[in-house]
Amino acid sequence: MNRSRPRRSRRPRRKPPTPFRQRGGKPVTDADSPSPDVAKTGSPVVMVVAWLWVAVPFLYGLYQLAEKSSKLFE
């Protein structure tokens, strides 16, 4: 019985991706991003509305899941 190792593919390996470049050909680095103290913060009202937009349907779905799964264990 002939047990041989599986063959390796003959495709060449992929090259690692090059970083995106800015105009002028300079690679983009973390040093090019704005500093954290300059970052803008959103309005608290918009933040609350955004959280409610996600949280209310999520909590309703959890409620429905608990209600329907409790019937399975009766």
Image (cartoon, rainbow, N blue to C red):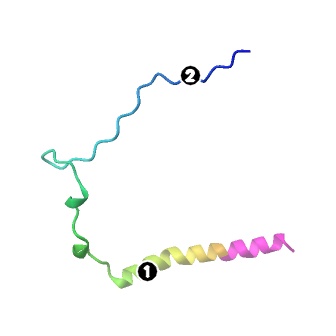
In the rendered structure, the answer to whether residue 54 lies left or right of residue 72 reads left
Q: As rendered, which of 32 and 6 lies closer to the eye?
A: 6
Residue 6, magenta (yes or no): no
Q: Earlier in the sequence, mark 2 or mark 1?
A: 2
- Quadrant into which the N terminus falls: top right
Q: Amino acid at mark 2?
A: Arg
Residue at image position (30%, 78%) is 41
Specify the principal SS of the magenta part.
helix
The quarter of the displayed image where residue 66 is located? bottom right
From the image, tell me which residue sits under label 2: 7
Q: Position of residue 16 (x, y in %)?
A: 35, 39
User: In the rendered structure, which segment of residues is drawn in magenta?
Assistant: 63-74
Q: Quadrant of residue 14?
A: top left
Name the amino acid type tagged 1.
Val
Helix, strand or loop at label 1? It is helix
Residue 29 x, y percent position in the rendering = 24, 55
Marks 2 & 1, CB-CB < 8 Å contact = no
Number of dots carrying numbers: 2
- Residue 46 x/y as whole percent: 37, 80
Q: Is residue 20 left or right of residue 66?
A: left
Marker disc for residue 19:
none
- x, y percent for residue 26: 16, 48
**Which residue sits at x=61%, y=23%?**
5
Q: The C terminus appears in which quarter of the rendering?
A: bottom right
User: Where is 8 relative to 46, above or below?
Assistant: above
Closer-to-camera residue (12/51): 12
Number of residues whose C-alpha sits closer than 10 Å to that of mark 2, classed few (under 14), some (14–19) or many (20 or more): few
- Mark on residue 49? 1
Q: Can you name the residue that lies furthest to the left here?
A: 24
Report the Cα–Cα distance between label 2 and label 1: 57 Å
